[in-house]
Image (cartoon, grey):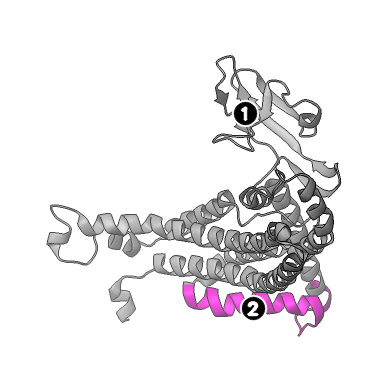
Amino acid sequence: MKRLLLIVLLVCSVGLRAGNTEHNPQQELDVREFILEHLADSYEWHIVSWGDTHITLPLPVIVFSKFTGWHIFSSSAFHDHPVYYGLSIATEGKYKGKIVEVRGDGRQHRPLDLSITKVVFSIFLNSFLLIVIIMLVARSYRKTGIAPRRGFAGMMEMFVMNVVDEVIKPCVGVDYKRYVPYLLTVFFFIFFNNLMGLVPFIPGGANVTGNIAVTFVLAIFTFLIVNASGTREYWREIFWPDVPLWLKIPVPLMPAIELVGMFTKPFALMIRLFANILAGHSIVLGLTSLIFITVKLGPVMNAEMTVLSVIFSVFIDVVELLVAYIQAYVFTMLSAVFIGLARVKPHQEDAH
């Protein structure tokens, strides 16, 4: 697990770090910066550091400046040239960690940034790996036919049948089959990326589902499918709900509430997934930082806090394995519920 390996490396370096702190009292761990650095996206994939040597995987930078046009180059160019073609990575301000262009007036201008960042690269790579896994399972079914499975194929079948039978079918209703491909894709995408976020090395380690841009896109997909699937009765209940007339005319109070509710549903999906994954990562990193924070309290206290930090971090890591599944399950279930609500039939049909 990512945090367990990180903790082991940190524990091994405590003595060295403590010695450095004694000689350089100004070099203290900035916990906030430490956590944000590990959670943030970047233009390169840091693999390992050994002393002053940092091994990273540079990623493609693709930006369009309205002043100088298109620029495509490797992010390693910023190592030798902090300012490259007038572009640099901001170290402070609202664009911190992002590529900016500084003009003659000294102001930072944000170009159109289509770069393959760590999160984007991880999405591409994890999606490819997930497709390969699904295709291998499907291939085994084509060879031997439909029969009870064991091993990895049986485990995948268990996940698929559980989501379809326990979530999609009861939540969506009779025409659930047309939504199975999307909902299963969402479930496995979130679940697989959550698991890969716990892996300590490439292709894992990226904070994909803890990035609000990713959860925003997933929520938008659900929002579009829900409203594209809405029946006439669904839209009638939004713009002309079955409530007393004075709640609709002259002030459309209930239609306004229903309309706002239509947008709060995907917003809740986005925030729930983002916040839960981000919180889990932050807690583990915060516990890990206790190893460095307690260095100045002496070797005895530092050793005790190191043991406690490792124990609690491993416990949270195990919990995160469960959370990885639960968050994928909840996102899929709520998406299915929203689709089912949009497929509401007229009351006359329900009576028959």
SS label for mark 2: helix
- Closest to the observer, 222 or 111: 111
Q: Give the x, y percent position of residue 83.
A: 72, 24
Residue at 60% over, 56% down? 210
Q: Give the x, y percent position of residue 70.
A: 68, 24
Is 162 one of the magenta-colored residues? yes
SS label for mark 1: strand
- Give left or right: position of 329 versus 70: left
Q: Quadrant of the N terminus?
A: bottom right
Q: CA distance from mark 1 to mark 2?
A: 48 Å
Residue at 68% over, 61% down? 290
Q: Quadrant of the C terminus?
A: bottom left
Query: Hey, what amino acid is under mark 2?
Result: Met
Labels 1 and 2 touching (C-beta < 8 A): no
Q: Give the x, y percent position of residue 116.
A: 71, 40
Report the residue marked by disc 1: 100
Q: Quadrant of residue 256?
A: bottom left
Furthest residue in direction bottom, as rendered: 148
Q: Give the x, y percent position of residue 336.
A: 50, 68
- Give left or right: position of 205 versus 247: right
Q: Which residues are magenta?
A: 142-171
Residue at 55% over, 58% down? 274
Report the residue marked by disc 2: 161
Residue at 40% over, 68% down? 341
Q: Main secondary structure of the magenta part?
A: helix
- Give left or right: position of 37 versus 338: right
Identify the disc placed on residue 42. none
